[in-house]
Image (cartoon, helix red, strand yellow):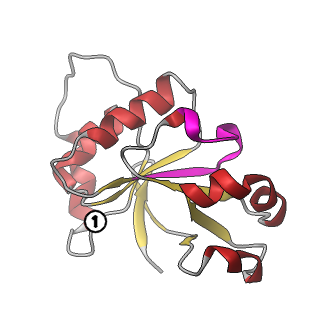
Amino acid sequence: MKKIIKDRHIIEDSWHTLDIAAEQWQSLSATRSIIVPCTLWQSDYMALLAYFQSGVGVALENITEPDTIPALDKIALLTIDFPLFNDGRGYSLARILREQFYYTGELRAVGDVLHDQLFYLARCGFNAFDLKPHVNIEHALLAFNSFSRVYQPASA
């Protein structure tokens, strides 16, 4: 099983990203914790919530408009994709979700996420991080202690 950082601890990731055709999600076990694309959530969220007992996560692109996500309070996990490490739109989306839309569930950074970004990502509201396979996850935990003082307000 893959390891991620959640709430500053290394854990086994129990979530499964939907990797089959959207029409076939009902063939999956209802006890799985599943992450679906935002487009599938937008079109079928009531059926997904009724079917998956362990909760549903939604994968967002960093250009997703938060007001297009129905039933945000019912989503257990949101992932925000970072297609490139130097693309900062995911930071802004995380802050908007936490501060303006009051999202309280797990907020996970995925994609091209580097260990030296973790401190800043956490300040923007992320509490989980799916790092690239080559990144030493134990070493990455040290990034949360990079700075002893901060000067700007944060979502964290």
Q: Which residues are magenta?
A: 67-80
Relative image position of residue 85 (x, y in whole percent)? 18, 53
**In which image quadrant can residue 26 be found?**
bottom right
Is 59 situated above or below 15?
Answer: above
Q: Classify residue 45 as left or right of residue 41.
A: right
Q: Which residue is mark 1?
A: 137
Q: For numbered disc 1, what is the local secondary structure? A: helix
29 and 43: which is toward the camera: 43
Query: Which residue corresponds to the image point at 70% horizontal and 40% vertical from the top-left?
Result: 71
Image quadrant containing the C terminus: top left
Say which of 12 and 29 sits in front: 29
Name the residue located 24 percent from the left edge and 60 percent from the top edge. Answer: 112
- Asked if residue 3 is positioned above or below residue 47 in the image, the reply reads below
Q: How many marks?
A: 1
Instruction: Assess whether residue 32 is covered by the magenta stretch.
Output: no
* Residue 52, horizontal then vertical, whole percent: 77, 65
- Mark 1 Cα within 10 Å, few/some/many (few <14, many 20+)? some
What residue is shown at x 41% (from left), y 26% (from top)? Answer: 155
Name which quarter of the figure residue 137 lies in.
bottom left
* Relative horizontal placement of residue 143, taking residue 129 as reference (left or right): left
Task: Name the residue at 30% across, 64% down.
Answer: 131
Q: Spot the residue most to the right.
A: 50
As displayed, is residue 70 above or below residue 41?
above
- Position in image of residue 54 (x %, y %): 74, 63
Point out residue 139 in the picture as x, y percentages from the top left corner: 21, 61
- What's under tag 1, amino acid-wise? Ile
Nearest the eye: 137 or 154 = 154
